[in-house]
Amino acid sequence: MVQPGDTLFSIAAAFGQDVKDLARWNSIDDPSRIRVGQTLRVVPPRSETAAVLPVTPTGPAVTKPLDGSSAAGTAAPAPAVEPSTVPGPVASIPETKPPAAAPSADWIWPVDGKVTEKFDEKRNKGIGIAAKEGDPVVASADGQVVYSGSGLRGYGNLVILKHSDDFISAYAHNRQILVKQGQMVKRGQRIAEVGKSDTTQPKLHFEIRRQGKPVDPLAYLPPR
């Protein structure tokens, strides 16, 4: 739901989506015209997440038992389609996989410091890590910068990285941002400096979101 101060761009960045996709999913012709209280779709509609493989008759019909063996007296089944040769969403049909998990080995701490604010789904969408102003903030995992700026209220100078179709991470209250939107970054690469923008003391507010939903970063970061 659109809140005061939200823009279509800031909403797209918060959910790791492309603003053009968000506009298309919600039939918005002018991205600058959204209203407070409006409900927006932030994930693809079903029609874009599923596809049907076309069937071209090239021979007699084939009957195949559920156990995978060929039925007697029938033509041999067509060769299996290699997932790598099928473009776009169709590739997910020959090879269906569950959403990628993010074991703690894939993530690193974005800054050195003590956790002073723990995750609470209703009150705090991430964790607060106390640090000195100017301390380096690094990418917690490989990804692409999908947002770099100060347009999301309450987050100050913010960087959002997209790591996969499932995961994004957010780094808020920075003093200085060192990366630009669209840039690819590596795990451990310096992306910002700790600051206190939109807060009273230097700290990093760090979030991990899975499929748009905030999750506890401590469940993914390596133990200390």
Image (cartoon, rainbow, N blue to C red):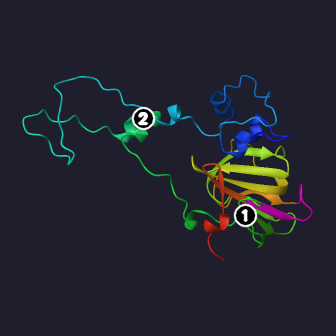
Q: Earlier in the sequence, mark 2 or mark 1?
A: 2
Q: CA distance from mark 2 to mark 1?
A: 38 Å
Above or below for 152 versus 108? above
Tell me: 88 left or right of 82: right
Q: Residue at x 20, y 49 (%)?
A: 67
Which of label 2 and label 1 is nearer to you? 1
Give the SS element for disc 1.
loop
Residue 196 lies, in percent from the top left, at: 89, 60
Residue 70 lies, in percent from the top left, at: 14, 42
**Which amino acid type corresponds to the residue marked 1 in the rendered image?**
Asp
**Which numbered circle lies on residue 90?**
2
**Which amino acid type corresponds to the residue marked 2 in the rendered image?**
Val
Q: Residue at x 89, y 55 (%)?
A: 198
Bounds of the magenta segment: 196-206
Q: Residue at x 39, y 39 (%)?
A: 93
Look at the image and say whether residue 198 sits in the magenta stretch: yes
Quarter location, residue 220: bottom right
Residue 122 lies, in percent from the top left, at: 74, 59
**Residue lying farthest to the right in this orientation:** 200
Look at the image and say whether residue 209 sits in the magenta stretch: no
Please name the residue that numbered disc 1 is placed on: 120
Quarter location, residue 223: bottom right
Mark 2 surroundings: few (<14), some (14-19) or many (≥20) residues within 10 A: some
Residue closest to the eye, 61 or 80: 61
Residue 20 lies, in percent from the top left, at: 67, 30
Residue closest to the eye, 157 or 68: 68
